[in-house]
Image: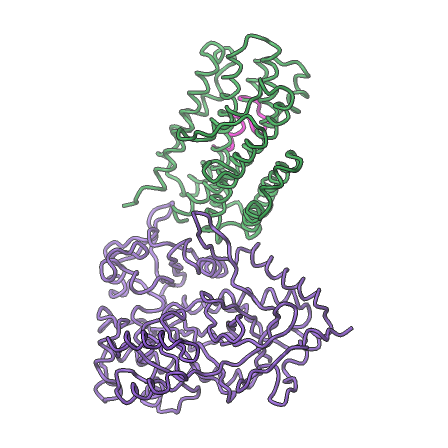
Amino acid sequence: MTNKQLFSSYQLLPNTWDEMYSETSNIRSQYEIINNYLRNTSTKVLYKKEELSRQLFMSQGVTFTVYNDNEGVEKIFPFDIVPRIITASEWEHIDIGIKQRLKALNLFIKDIYHDQFIIKDGIIPAELIYSCPYFLREMKGVKVPHDIYVHIAGVDLIRNSDGEFYVLEDNLRTPSGVSYMLENREISKRIFPGILPKNGIRPVSDYPNLLYKKLKALSNHSDPNIVLLTPGIYNSAYYEHTTLARLMGIELVEGSDLVVQDHVVYMKTTSGLKRVDVIYRRVDDDFLDPLEFNASSALGVAGIMAAYRKGNVNIVNAPGTGIADDKAIYIYVPDMIRYYLNEEPILKSIKTYQLANSEDYAYVVENIKKMVLKKTDGSGGYGMLMGHEASDEEIADYIDTVNKKPENFIAQPILSLSTAPCCINGVLSPRCIDLRPFALTGPDGIDITPGGLTRVALKEGSLVVNSSQGGGSKDTWVIQ
Amino acid sequence: MLSRVANNLIWLERYMERGNGILSLLKVNFYANQDSPELFPWTPIIKNYTDYNNTFYTENTVECLDFMIFNRDNANSILNIVTRARENARSVQEHISRELWICVNNYYLFLTKKGLRKKLKNEDPIEFLDNLRNYHLMFYGIMDITQERGAPYYFLNLGKFLERMILVSDFTELKLTEIAKTTDKLEQSFYWKNLLLSMGGYQLYLKKYKSAFKEDHIISMVFQEKLFPRSLYYCVNKLNLSVGKLIEGGQLDKNYIEFSLGKLESTIKYTTIESINKQGLEHFINEIKQDIHDISKSINKIYFSEIT
């Protein structure tokens, strides 16, 4: 029996790339197997699979707690059961594109904290660097092991109506979401038994081992003490921290578990102090060391920066990488690729307007309905203005804020994110998606786990995929 | 192992053990209370497991069960205990088996499920309590077969047997207070039987001493029975074993704990029934409680203090 109802109301969005259907409404070949499977599955069974996935997330504790009136409510990051599928050639393009970008970004960070050739050569204006809140003077002249600053990156890509992948953000600080990449796959295995091997889908489960190998390579010791530093149980990504620590077999520590003595970091154990060699920190720069940054931070460790500068401990990612992941710096990444690598950028960037520039400003204000305005240091989908859905009043208010400090704002044309089929109330409907592959950089090069996290804007017509604003996720399949 | 982790492990197990003890107590008192509410009231139980600020007392069975299981203001409600057990488990997931974490997490999710609290009012209370208690039994079993015999296991056991000794001495003291109020031998025997039931030792008692309730036998069962897994004798042996393993593995400093543990051990093992009777059972229990308190304090001191 075929489930006709499931596909009955799949309405392609105008001027939008759909991952499953081509412009001529044919099923793209990579979706054929899953498509046949879904067609032969009743709505009732699909509901059951959805319920199963929810239960699995809950009982494994893949949850975050929302506190309300002292009562914690466990929430899951919504999961859509229909996978997003990427072909081998699409993936290859993404893979080499991200590698190229990260190579250039790493060189840029090193350059900025040392000789600053890129400023001297007039490629990037100095004031842009020095006015960036993510620029850390504390990192000036610091030699970092193997010159690697960004060990872990989660580059956000979107697919425009032309079918091309564009980089939205580089996420070079403490990107999260990789545990969902791992967990989503485990759940797919259970709700679509046999379908993964039939499609020849590349596995993702090697990520923790690969991460461990990269972290280990940073130390000169044969058996280094590697820890994962978490802000603690109340952090919304705490699940991810426990998962990664567990899967790598390393200790999960909080700031209060660590202490610095004579520029060496130790952890407080039941058998006394034990030296720590590598810290994979999930605490932001600002909170890392109360002696150097935010003095009221209880999440970090006093003296850790001094120990780092002495080379006694390794911090991953290096402090100060935010300088390369600021929205105003983003504009210059293609120039960086040309400057440092003498190559043309493989992945496209989105045309970005600097509001401090009067020409750009005029253009943006005139075309504001087609623009999205962002704060240069904003993230998580906050502090944005989506021109096409804002009221005149909201626009006027936003422009007022921009006028106070135009250099803190950029604008980009609103791109149409590609859509993928999602199972919504028992029928498939197109929803906007993005893609965050996770790249690991070590002395032996860059490795990108095939796939990543596909985020979905579950609200109809929405372009915001952030989990804090009604987003969900999908498993991401890359075909061999 | 991190000191914080050791502390989390101890408290994970202490909360789970306490939950199990309270559920048994509620179940046994439920049956007894239906027979003779004047002998087995709810108020002393509420009093024992709430702090000084508590003003809520009830003799309504369902109300009391609801308070002891679900009330968020009651620090020792099962819901609060399990919430804290889960938080402790959550932050030591890389040290406990995956199955153990999922067990505690599922228990928490079951307790917080919408509509569960209403069920207590309309359904068989014993089945309700048993359903909760099954999570504890599962927890014990899972820990036994999945947890490697390393430091985490011994920290968990340290917490388990410490808490169990506290529960047993609390239960005994609760009954002693009631027994002191009456001179009726039959009534007294009800209390003793009730104590054995709530500790889960009634069956063993019958096997050993038959259906005759003699105070000396019961005291020796609660305190000195080597084969009874909830006697103080058994618990102190197990506690000693865990502490010994931890000292051996360099996880615990001998000086902190050996004295108070040794003192407790000799009090339990080498006090005869005659000398207990001579000093009075209440005095004896207070002495034991003081020793347990000292041990618990010295463990907290190790893991809460700053290491310099």
Residue A477 lies in quadrant: bottom right
Residue A451 rendering spot, x and y as whole percentages: 53, 75
Left or right of A377? Residue B87 is right
Residue B240 rendering spot, x and y as whole percentages: 47, 32
Q: Colour of chain A?
A: purple
Magenta stretch prevailing secondary structure: helix
Instruction: Kindly give the residue lying farthest to the top in the view shown.
Output: B183
Residue B262 rendering spot, x and y as whole percentages: 42, 27
Observer able to see residue A43: yes
The tally of labels here is 0
Residue under the point 53% across and 45% down: B149
Residue B241 rendering spot, x and y as whole percentages: 49, 34
Instruction: Kindly give the residue lying farthest to the right in the view shown.
Output: A1
Residue A204 lies in quadrant: bottom right
Residue A213, relative to residue A420: is it above or below? above
Observer able to see residue B236: no
Q: Nearer the viewer, residue A346 or B265?
A: A346
Q: What coloring was used for the rendering? A: by chain
Q: Nearer the viewer, residue B235 or A346?
A: A346
Residue B296, relative to residue A3: is it above or below? above
Residue under the point 30% across and 68% down: A319
Residue A201, relative to residue B16: is it above or below? below
Q: Which residues are magenta?
A: B223-240
- Give the chain coloured green: B
Q: Nearer the viewer, residue A106 or B252?
A: A106
Is residue B280 in the magenta section?
Answer: no
